[in-house]
Image (cartoon, coloured by chain):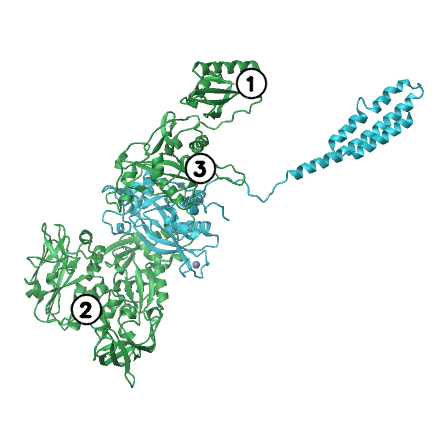
Amino acid sequence: MKISLNWLSDYVDIEGVEPAELAEKITRSGIEVDAVDNRSEGLKNIVVGHVLECSQHPQADKLNICRVDVGEEEPSQIICGAPNVAAGQKVVVARPGARLPGGVKIKKAKLRGEESHGMICSLQELGFDGKVVPKAYASGIYVLPEDARPGEDALGLLGLDDTVLELDLTPNRSDALSMLGAAYEAAAILSKDVNLPETAHEESAEPASGLLNLRVDAAEANPLYAAKVVRNVKVGESPEWLKARLMAAGVRPLNNIVDITNYVLMEYGQPLHAFDYDRLGTGEIVVRHAAEGEVIETLDGTERKLEPHHLLITNGREPVAIAGVMGGANSEVHDGTTTVVIEAAYFSPASVRKTSRELGLRSDASTRFEKGVDPNRVIEAGERAAALMADLAGGEVLSGTVLFDELDKEPKRVTVSPDFINERLGMKIPFEEMEEILRRLQFPYEAVNGQFVIDAPTRRVDISIPEDIVEEIARLYGYDEIPATLPVTESLPGGLTPYQDKRRTVRRYLEGAGLYQAITYSLTSESESQKFALETAPVTRLLMPMSEERSTLRQSLLPHLLDAVTYNTARQTSSVALYEVGSVFLGEGEDGLPTEVEHAAGAVTGEWSAAGWQGGQKRVDFFAVKGIVEGLATELGLSDKLSFRKGEMDGLHPGRTADVLLDGERVGIIAQLHPSEQKARDLKDTVVFELNLQRLLREETEPLLYTPVPKFPSISRDIALVVPKAVQAAALESTIRTNAGSILKDVHVFDVYEGDRMEEGMKSIAFSLTYLDPERTLTDEEVSEMHNRIVAALESEGAQIRN
Amino acid sequence: MEQQLQQLKDEALQAIASAADVKSLNDVRVKYLGKKGPITDLLKGMGKLPAEERPKMGALVNEVRGEVTAELESRMAVLEEEAVAKKLDAESIDVTLPGTPVRTGNHHPLTRIIEEIEDFFISMGYEVAEGPEVEKDYYNFEALNLPKGHPARDMQDSFYITEDILLRTHTSPVQARTMEAKQGKPFKIICPGKVYRRDNDDATHSHQFTQIEGLVVGENIRMSDLKGTLDRFAKKMFGEDREIRLRPSYFPFTEPSVEMDISCFKCGGSGCNVCKKTGWIEILGAGMVHPNVLRMGGYDPDVHSGFAFGMGPERIAMLKYGIEDIRHFYTDDLRFIGQFRRTEG
Ligand SMILES: [Zn+2]
């Protein structure tokens, strides 16, 4: 909402308050002022000119040479290129030395050999937004009324000697969508009175009801409809002051009748509509809901198809307006209109909101009806418009109002105690100060048994409960006055849950292992949404996606994580290691919501350890990433429960994919991407993992207990085996463990060889075994005996022992 | 024999002095003091001497042997030291060459901010509460005093899945769920998480972003408690000399509602580009929990009251680190993320 301070001062005395100071006060007490626009800033030496002569420039078709009286003895010669310039006009002249918006300086100039002493201005050149410039002057100079005096400062005439505050209103403060609402706010802040506009006007003896019948068939959606009839109006341009105010408020002037309805809309926040009585044709207004399939052509020339819940104003036969949203083309006021019907109505917010949404039509009128207009100012606004039409369009107002009125206009009664207010705020505002604030707000109240019984004015639709009064008192008393304390509650221990704590451990571990944390989008395309998913579940798709690319919730973190890897490798970061912890969404779980499962995923490509000056470069491979996952399991105390087996999944290398199992149940994968997937993503060898983190973090682990440090030495023995390539290390290890007694403490692979020196189809694999008895020193003999038993078992399974 | 002994001693001392390294000195030791050396021979030959001369000669031989041995040892010490010095010199390296890099990653900047905020509130006795990102309309709107058709629903256009299920537009549904779960008991929580709104992604908008909200419910929770809490928070996050101010605002779930500004941490309040010349920076929204919200969460507004606040980690990170475009947070460029590694303070 744009508030012209010139206009505002009609209703409240703001004399002596600097605009910036007023803006600051309004902001601090409740309504944010977004901008303070001093409209004459940077403008000077701009005067009224009288075009005495106007002839075509001999050297240029599109230029005119004008002799303009600017209030000096001699007229000035000014070259003007506007198509609408003509002798006899009063115009706006920027004289040599003038300043225009944007720092433009006007100097004497020669145009095609002819001198020009200044410039005749369009409104746009004076800083007006093209959207508010009257259509007649949209592509030319602006023409002032005939009574403008040459040489007079033009800024005042154009309403540019003004400052406009731009209010950024929160949805609850729709009362300030009007000059009067802003005036009540300013009056409360400055402790002033509000002067209401003049609504008195003369009336002819003839009653309006003689010309117009009214029937409302939808009282719930339209509980109040008031119509005034004004005869013998002269449609024409509005006076300068009215046009200037509308433009300052961001409204384009059209003609005096429409301008008056818009003026009252801005003044009262009450939308009005003016019908041409003769074009209405029937002398009747019927308010009803639309019939199935009914159609109306609105003012903007668009044909609109209506639904049965849309509220219409009709002439008894056909629709003439969509109630509260937009008028129809058939009953519009035009230059030849002589009799006008002014509609002032209350349309229910819900009805207007639904209609304007469905038709995609939002207007100054609909936004105000949607929030709820002041029930007690509807009829008054109609009277105000009638008074202005009598005054500015020479109209004759017929007596009385054609009225349908079932609207509840009672104020809301709110009872609140001063103690409650102080308790909620943690303050000690004296009773008298609270009374003073209520008076400034013009909230009628009585003090009954130490309680305030307040009749909240109907203009303030946001006031209905005691907490609303707490806010009103606090904001006008000043939030700076509230002390800073801390809550006094039952002392509660704060902290992370074990799950949250472990999740932090996981992040830190993965970062310690060299991975950077990524955060990617949850929404992806439907076709990507199930890629790399660990479980099969229905997809969760948006009803109305903004794009197919972001239409469906992901079931794996990997697709977006791989996008991030590609993003980096495409920007000269060839080695990338990223991880993400986030939710995947498995369709149709409890309560119709998808089941959200927290996953951890990683993607690594390029060098694993960089080639420094000492060499030692190592490229990322499956085992580097498997090591990270194994380390994570150790970190979480799950290494004994975790195992791996060959796995497969679309998009992954069929020979380099492992399922990660927790107690035999699949909880994740580790794999190199399939070469075709890598190619499609423009990646070199890339290894990924994805784990059902939630499953891992919820797995209960034994309490951590210390095992005594061994007092006796251990003995190590190695076994080198030759086996077919297909034999898995895990199977051999399992044979070793099942055949070893309790003194075998550790087994690990320390060498694998598959090269030329091996027989075709065979590989060599070497284990190191460690034996230990915590109670005594082992003898060579008993270790040898155990070791031989293991060797024999391996041999019986077909392994050859290598020496 | 005495003369022979003297000559031997001179020879030995000469050889010791001219030994250039440990090895040749060892040769000297073997030559003169070894089992087959001349001094041993002399001792062996003593049997031939008359009995009365033997003690004197014995003493003399031992004396010479002692002198030679001492000289040998001291020379040995010198030579060994020289050898070590030479070896160390050969082993010296260029200490200005770079060390072997330790490969580690780091937190995403949003996680860094969120954990910092979490840790502050945990220290004030708050729990961290989380909830689903796909929510029921009831928890996202209705339980927060935003019934269907409420005008404030316009403020946050949403991604609906069905008419009743949507991607949460704020983390407030966690507050509603927590109130239900706490069954009338007092509590203090903060709720971090991802939220979603129908916005086109640009420098200042992202269809996915993060939020942290806080909620305190108990008996006689006052607006001054909110102010005190936010004041401590602002000082912790943005520096001890920060001041805060509250401005009236509107949120459907709080009444009164406020926005909190902090005094500009860049210019201290005199006005700069960060604070758009106002000296103040808007950080978060807050307010006293609306009685309807308390009621729907199972709390009696006549007995209980509460405050709530909410902020955007993206905005805080952008202000704190001077980041100009919100899209950086979701592009995962290592040249961006990698900058948020070191400690501060
Ligand atoms: Zn600043």
Which comes before the other along the chain, label 1 or label 2? 2
**With B102 as the anchor, is B308 left or right in this view?**
left
Tell me whether marks 1 and 2 sit on the same chain. yes
Up/down of A695 relative to A578, above or below: above
Please give the chain letter of the residue carrying mark 3: A
Image side of residue A364 versus residue B115, left or right: left
Chain at numbered mark 1:
A
Which chain is mark 2 on?
A
Q: Give the residue at mark 2.
A: A199
Q: Which mark is residue A775?
A: 1
Label 3 is placed on what type of residue?
Leu
Q: Are marks 3 and 2 in contact (CB under 8 Å)?
A: no
Q: CA distance from mark 1 to mark 2?
A: 107 Å
**Does label 2 lie on the same chain as label 3?**
yes
Q: Which quadrant of the figure has residue A137?
A: bottom left
The foreground one among A134 and A36 is A134
- Mark 3, Cα crowd under 10 Å, few <14 / some 14-19 / many 20+, is many
Q: Colour of chain A?
A: green
Tell me the SS state at disc 3.
helix
Q: What x and y, as percent, mark residue B202?
A: 33, 52
What color was chain B assigned in the picture? cyan
Q: Nearer the viewer, mark 1 or mark 3?
A: 3
